[in-house]
Amino acid sequence: MNRFKTLFEKKQRGLLSVYFCAGHPTADSTLDILTALQEGGADMVEVGIPFSDPLADGPAIQQAATTALRGGMTVKTLMDQLRTMRPAIHIPVVLMGYLNPILHYGFERFCRDCQACGVDGLIIPDLPFDECRSEFAATAHAHGLEFIFLVTPETPEERIRLIDDATDAFIYAVSAPAVTGAKNDFSAASKAYFARLEAMRLKNPLLVGFGISNRTTRAAADAHTSGVIVGSKFVKLLESTASPAEAVSALVEALDRD
């Protein structure tokens, strides 16, 4: 069952995917956050595996990872938590993690456990695309997992089309060559980049991440792509609200506010 295809057949625009770091704000909050996001209207969820050196992440997510690691979150702990999420959670769930802890766990074991938990896809930002295709993709696909790849404003069109051919999930369009973090608006260059991606007529949906935090940034991305991925904004809300449900409600309000 490809939950990505099911989702994208039902909804082509205005998609909302939300990231949070497993083990933050508390060690046992993973399933509560997943449930709150689904009930609050998220179309997809990206669960982060905390790592001590998250190179692509800004301060908010770095701090969340530190909190999670100090609280004892590991790959094994996360897998144990996710084993009971299906069938209560019916939206696609993606795991985002850096290569080091996944290799330490064992990649085939990782994929096998992901399949047992009902995970749909993987984002490994420090795994080079060519190495992924040659060394890892076959194992992931054998366990029903799709790789999601990142593209940036600097990614050549030829490379983007290769990436489009290599997945049956979606393409993660990084809004700008920087680390994660909320923005008030996107630059003209970023908006032109979104338009350029739209004009390529790729077979997979495009979701924009890095910087989505309010109605303005969401609208700029939605104008040219299938939707957005929100990370830092939600991570901060998990810290400043009393419950995951309140954090989700505050996020929806921020993204829909006039």
Image (tube, rainbow, N blue to C red):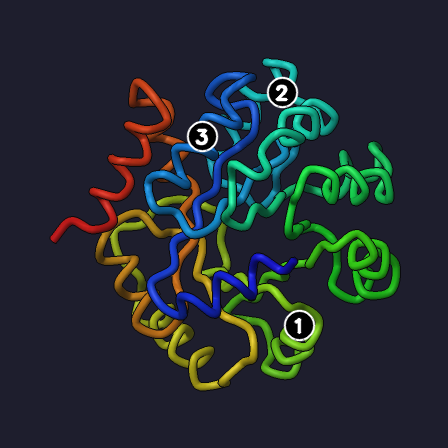
- Circle 3 or circle 2, nearest the eye: 3
Residue 180 horizontal/vertical position (percent): 47, 46
Asked which secondary structure carries label 3, the reply is helix
Marks 3 and 2, how far apart in space?
18 Å
Q: State the residue position of label 1.
A: 163
- Residue plotted at (38% across, 79% down): 195
The front one of 197 and 82 is 82
Measured in 3D between alpha carbons, the distance from the residue under mark 2 to the one under mark 1, in whole angstroms, is 32 Å
Q: Which residue is mark 2?
A: 69
On the image, numbered disc 3 is attached to which residue? 33
Question: In terms of sequence position, does the residue under pointer 2 or pointer 1 come before the other?
Answer: 2
Quadrant the N terminus occupies = bottom right
The reply to whether callout 2 and callout 1 are in contact (CB within 8 Å) is no
Compared with 140, 68 (above or below) is: above
- Disc 2 marks a residue whose amino acid type is Leu
Q: Nearer the viewer, residue 50 or 111?
A: 111
Q: Is residue 176 left or right of residue 28?
A: left
CA distance separating discs 1 and 3 = 31 Å
